[in-house]
Amino acid sequence: MAKRDFYQVLGVKRDASEEEIRKAYRNLARKFHPDVNKAAGSEDRFKEIGEAYSVLNDSKKRAAYDKYGEMWKHAEELDAAAESRSGPNAHYTHMEDLGSLFEELFRTRGPRGYSSPSRGSGVFPIPGMDQHAKIDISLEEAFHGASRTLRFTYPESQPDGQGRPRSEEIKVKIPPGVTNGQILRLAGKGGPGSGNAPSGDLYIELRITPHKLFEVDGKDIYLSLPISPWEAALGATISVPVLAGKVEMKIPAGAQAGGKLRLKGKGLPGSPAGDQYVVLKIVTPKAKSQKQREFYRDMAEEFNYDPRAELGV
């Protein structure tokens, strides 16, 4: 029985890009993987998908398949036989032409070393599954960069050749400037393939843990900065913590609680880098002595200020 067209198996057009083929394979492989889909026929469908992907994802194999269809594995021999019959520009477009050429090839060279493309050995190359992991990192690690070592143990369906589950350590380099929820893709570091098929990819989601001082929004960071009433009223130049250490920042006279000041480029690194926003929080000290209480009363009389005047109460 003739096999289904590989492009139809993956549900893509014949001029599909490599990325479209990879995307189609990942979606179908996840849907029909035997560990996920227990329906009758899912394993055969999974093998069919893997065989189609192993050919269409390889530019050389895909070119041979586009030219010879099911007989793509014998492309070199068919090319040589075609050239000997009709010259280097021979091109066969009909299956009966290919069939007669294939029969002639076997008559002249013998079947040794070849397997029938309609039967095969029963062992299909199956690309490895994509793997997914999550890594928690600190805000400092997101700023400076970091590294992690992950260990994956693959199921017995992908043994190491001696009947044991395969285990692998993968070193992950986290570049400076990553953001919360960002996905790192490590090509070829996912589950191993079988039958010389390529491995899947490894997708790592980065999660920045809460920080004691800063809040994160993309590449920008926010700091709630306590200041005294006199610093707010008179203005001041004070030291402010940033991810790279500290900077001197000028608070303008008459600053109000909730006011937001920007330190350009002091957020997470990148092109462009994020900013740091400083949100002012006016903290009023407690009057702990009679002299301090009298000072507050003198302030009230001197300013004669009603902060609730606009409320009309």
Image (spheres, rainbow, N blue to C red):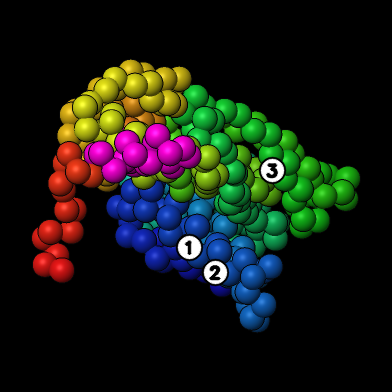
Query: How packed is label 3: few (under 14 Cα within 10 Å), some, or many (20 or more)?
Result: few
Which residue is drawn at the image coordinates 69% and 43% (left, top)? 113
Displayed quadrant of residue 228: top left
Query: How packed is label 2: few (under 14 Cα within 10 Å), some, or many (20 or more)?
Result: some
Q: Separation of disc 3 and disc 1 at Cα?
A: 35 Å
Disc nearest the viewer among 3 and 1: 1
Tell which of 188 and 114 is nearer to you: 188
The reply to whether dot 1 and dot 2 touch (C-beta < 8 Å) is yes
Quadrant into which the N terminus falls: bottom right
Residue identified by numbered label 1: 27
Q: Secondary structure at mark 2?
A: helix
Residue identified by numbered label 3: 113
Residue 243 included in the magenta stretch of the image: no
* Residue 276: x %, y % from top left: 33, 32
Q: Is residue 229 left or right of residue 291?
A: left
Which residue is drawn at the image coordinates 36% and 31% (left, top)? 267
3 or 2: tag closer to the N-terminus: 2
Q: Is residue 141 left or right of residue 150?
A: left
Q: Magenta segment, which residues?
A: 277-299
Q: Is residue 270 at all visible to an observer of this figure? A: no
Q: Separation of disc 3 and disc 2 at Cα?
A: 36 Å
Residue identified by numbered label 2: 31
- Residue type, mark 1 in image: Asn
Tell which of 130 and 214 is nearer to you: 214
Q: Secondary structure at mark 3?
A: loop
